[in-house]
Amino acid sequence: MGYFTVSGLDMPVSGEVRISGAKNAALPELAAAVLCEGAALDNCPRLSDIETAAKILENAGFSFERAGGCVSVLPRENQNGCVPEELCGKMRSSILFLAPLLCRCGEAAVYMPGGCCLGARPVDLHIYVLETLGAKISADNCKITASAPNGLNGAEIDLPIPSVGATETAVMAAACASGESVIKNPAMEPEIEDLCRFLNSAGADTVFGREIKIRGKNGLLERAQHSVMPDRIEAGTYLAAAAITGGELYLKNAEQRHILPFIKILENMGCIIKSRSQSIYIDAPGCLYSPGLVETAPYPEFPTDLQPQLTALLAVKRGKCTVRENIFESRLGHIPQLRKMGADIEIHDERTFTVRGLDGPLKSESVRATDLRCGAALILAGLAAKNGNRVEGGEYILRGYEDICKKMSLIGIKIKYST
Ligand code: UD1
C-alpha cells in the first residue's frame, strides 16, 4: 500500500505541465481494439488501469506492446472471451471488454467489476444494450455471460440515463452488428466522441451527436490508428492546483472546451484563464471567492470527476458554497478527510453538502484516499496546508495521474510516493 507525502508550499505553483492522454478515453479504446485487426494508440498514458487493460487483452489472446506513448495491440492466433475475476475486480472499465469480446468470440464472460466505490454502480444498462442488440445474457451477483453465436443485430437503443459506460458498450457492439443502430439519450462526453473516432479509423461508420447513429459492419473492423484525446480531468486538477496556491500555470495538450463549466467557475472565483488551441493558461490571485452553488451533471455540465478537487479548493477560499452531486449517490469520501484537515463542511444528505471557506490554510494531517478523485482532492488539500499532508491509499491516485510526482515537482510542489 503506497502513500504520498506532500510537503506543503512555500510558493505558489508556477511553470508548465504537459497533460497526458485521457484514461477514460484510452480504456474504452483498448477494449475496442478487440474488435479490430490491430490497433496503434498514440498518447496512451502510463497508468495502473492501463496495465490492467493490457493484462485483460493479453489474457484474451492479444499482444500488447508499448514504445513510449504509443501502444500497439494485435490479435494472436486464438482468442478467448473470458476476463479473469481478479482483473475484473481491479477496475470498473473491465465491463467494457464484454461487448467487444462477445463480438469477436461469439460468447464472453466478465465478473462484476470493481473500481472506485462511488455508490451501487450497477451494470444493468450494459446488459440492456447487449440484449437489445440480440445477445443472450445470463447474469448472477458475480458473473455475466453473453452469447451471440450468429452476431448482433442493429437496433434502437434508448438509454433511460446517459450512462458513459453503457453508451460505450452500445457504440462498440453496434459498430460490428449487422444493420443500423441509433443510440437515443447517449452520454455526450468527449471521450465517447474520441471512441467513435477510434472506431471510424478502423472502418466503422459511427456518427456522434445527440443521437449516435451507427451503420454496423456485420463483422470485425480493420486496423485502427488513433491518438488519445487529452485528459480533461487531469487538466482540471492542475488548474485547481494553481487556484489553490494562487499560482500561474501553462497547460500543454489541454482543451478548454472540454471543461468549460469548471473554467467558468474558476473565472467567477477570480482566476484569469486564457486558452489557445490545445493549451490553457491560468493566473490565480491569492484571494478567490466561492461560486455559491455547484451541481454535477452529465456533459456538457460540471463533471462529477472534478467535484472532489473543487471541494478542496472551496475549503480554503472565501465564502460559502453548496455542492450537489447528481451522478453518483455516494461520492463524498473526501469530505471526512478534508474535515480532518480542518475544513468546515456540513453534509446535508448523501449527495449535498455546504463548504464554508476558511480563507486560510488547512491543518497538516495524515488522510486516506477512498477513491481516485478523492485522492487528487487530498493532494490539493496538502498544498493548502502549511506543512503539507500524508495521503494514504496512494494506489488510487496512480490509477489516473501519469507521472504525478514528476509533473508536480516541475511546477514547484514537493511530493513523494512511497510504498
Ligand atoms: C465513467 C467514468 C468515470 C465518471 C463517470 C461519470 C470511465 C472509465 N469512467 O464511469 O470516471 O465518473 O463516467 O462521468 O470512463 N449506471 C447504472 N447502470 C449501468 C451503468 C451506470 O445505473 O449499467 C449509473 C451509475 O451507477 C451512475 C450513473 O449511471 O449513477 C452514471 O454512470 P456512468 O456514466 O455509467 O459512469 P461510468 O461509465 O461507470
Image: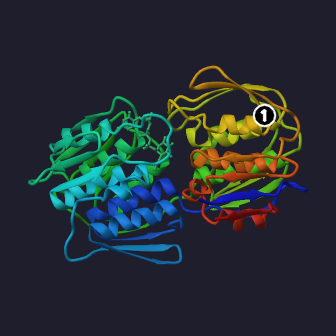
User: Relative to residue 325, is residue 381 depicted above or below?
Assistant: below
Disc 1 element? loop
Q: Position of residue 227 (x, y in %)?
A: 47, 66
Residue found at the far bottom of this picture: 67
Question: Looking at the picture, how far across and down is residue 270, in whole percent?
Answer: 82, 38
Q: Residues within 10 Å of mark 1 (few under 14, many from 20)?
A: many
The three-letter amino acid code for the residue at tag 1 is Ala
* Residue position marked by numbered label 1 in the rendering: 343
Identify the residue shown where x is 66% and y is 49%: 376
Relative to 359, say whether 101 is above or below. Answer: below
Left/right of residue 350 with respect to residue 83 in the rendered view: right
- The tally of labels here is 1
Name the residue: 82% across, 32% down.
289
Q: Position of residue 394 (x, y in %)?
A: 62, 56
| Viewer-side residue, 339 vs 359 | 339
Q: Where's residue 196, x and y in %?
A: 37, 54
Q: Residue at x 59, y 51 (%)?
A: 232
Visible in this render: residue 260?
yes
Q: Quadrant of the N terminus?
A: bottom right
The quarter of the image holding the C terminus is bottom right
Q: Is residue 157 left or right of residue 402?
A: left
